[in-house]
Amino acid sequence: MKYLEEFRDAERVRKVAAAVAAVAPADRAFTFMEVCGTHTMAVARYGLKKLLPANVRLISGPGCPVCVTPKEYVDHAVALAREPGVAVATFGDMMRVPGSSSDLLRLQAEGADVRVVYSARDAVAFARAEPDRRVVFLGVGFETTAPTVAATAKEAAAAGIRNYFVLAAHKLIPPAMRALCESGDVALDGFLCPAHVSAIIGARVYEFIPRDYGLACAVAGFEPVDILQGIYLLLKQYADGERRVDNQYSRVVKREGNLRAQEVQAEVFDVCDSRWRGLGDLPASGLAIREEYAALDAARALEVEPEETVPDHGCICGDVLTGAKVPADCPLFGDECTPARPVGPCMVSSEGSCAAAFKFEYE
Ligand code: SF4
């Protein structure tokens, strides 16, 4: 298959790995962060860390949308699911994320109307077909999913569907990367920038990182050759003595991104401050539904009282999401916390660092 097999070809992988080893300056160590959860999974699945030189370390970042969604949001979703006449529609990853006293999967088993959907359009279809139910779509994700949710909001409003709502918690990746640069908690040398997100926002949005923080950036696709080429580009910037934004994934990502998707997103959402698991409250890092669409904003239109959020005990997902710790540092990893019995969101999500480490690296 074009654009797939050639990027998984073992011989090409070996050649790029050799190029990475050859370009890596030997006189110092490097730490790069893969920001995207899909990169984290691919790195673990293909064992790519084992192909890197000993002085090049790859750590995971806050690019799993379910993982960075704060527990307060889960508690809000749980409260909505407990309301009579409300159907909560969500991507499957959210079902088992623990709230303070319950999760959506447990509520579904207890009889609540919780439905797994593959897109926000499925939720709009439910609302259209069942006008007596209030259908709430859980708007969790990054810039990749926000435009599609915005499109469904416009579609529902235009069709006069008044029982479709969105509980918005979309987050923006560049402010999180800025926060990581500013925090200094982890000494980074560069970012392997996300692929899907960059298809929407473009490669140019990362230019502040080399300019303001002197770190290397490379947008890379998800296949093994893509990822290794991305790491090659990061190291090459150090070999060249120049930091910049390289784009390995130019077959998909343009410098300016997808302008139409950005436009649709801006019609429905305003940029707002947002709370991230691990990173805390970050200015201008989330999306809130604009006043024109307030009628479908579940946070404003549906009155519920979420329970008081109980802090996590033992789970160090917050530190894992910032790269300060790795899953194996968690005392619960692989013992009390497994994919079958997840304690935190990083073990629930198919893009979570703990799930990736358990599935592909745990022995
Ligand atoms: S192993 Fe489980 S408890 Fe530990 S950080 Fe990961 S998700 Fe949280």
Image (cartoon, rainbow, N blue to C red):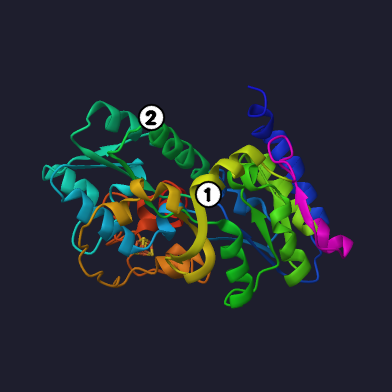
Instruction: Residue 185 in the image: state x and y as whole percent.
Output: 57, 77
**In the displayed structure image, the side of residue 173 where residue 310 appears, left or right:** left
The majority secondary structure of the magenta stretch comes to loop
Q: Residue at x 38, y 34 (%)?
A: 156
- Vertical position of residue 116 compared to residue 53: above or below: above
Task: Tell me if residue 117 is in the magenta stretch.
Answer: no
Task: Compare residues 328 and 145 and report the one nearer the observer.
Answer: 145
**In the displayed structure image, the side of residue 264 where residue 188 appears, left or right:** right
- Camera sees residue 312: yes
Quadrant occupied by the C terminus = bottom left
- Please tell me in which quadrant of the rendered image residue 26 appears: bottom right
Of callouts 2 and 1, which one flags the residue occurring earlier in the amino acid sequence? 1
Determine which residue is flagged by label 2. 159
Q: Residue furthest top?
A: 1
Q: Residue at x 30, y 70 (%)?
A: 312
Instruction: Residue 75 in the image: state x and y as whole percent.
Output: 26, 60
- Callout 2 secondary element: loop
**In the displayed structure image, the side of residue 166 where residue 32 appears, left or right:** right
Q: State which mark lies toward you, 2 or 1.
A: 2
Task: Compare residues 289 and 25 and report the one nearer the observer.
Answer: 289
Task: Compare residues 26 and 340 and report the one nearer the observer.
Answer: 340
In the rendered structure, which segment of residues is drawn in magenta? 236-255
Q: Residue furthest bottom?
A: 184
The CA distance from mark 2 to mark 1 is 44 Å
Instruction: Residue 214 in the image: state x and y as whole percent.
Output: 77, 70
Quadrant occupied by the N terminus = top right
Determine which residue is flagged by label 1. 44
The image quadrant where one finds ligand 1 is bottom left
- Please tell me in which quadrant of the rendered image residue 23 appears: bottom right
Q: Residue at x 72, y 45 (%)?
A: 256
Q: Residues within 10 Å of mark 2 (few under 14, many from 20)?
A: few
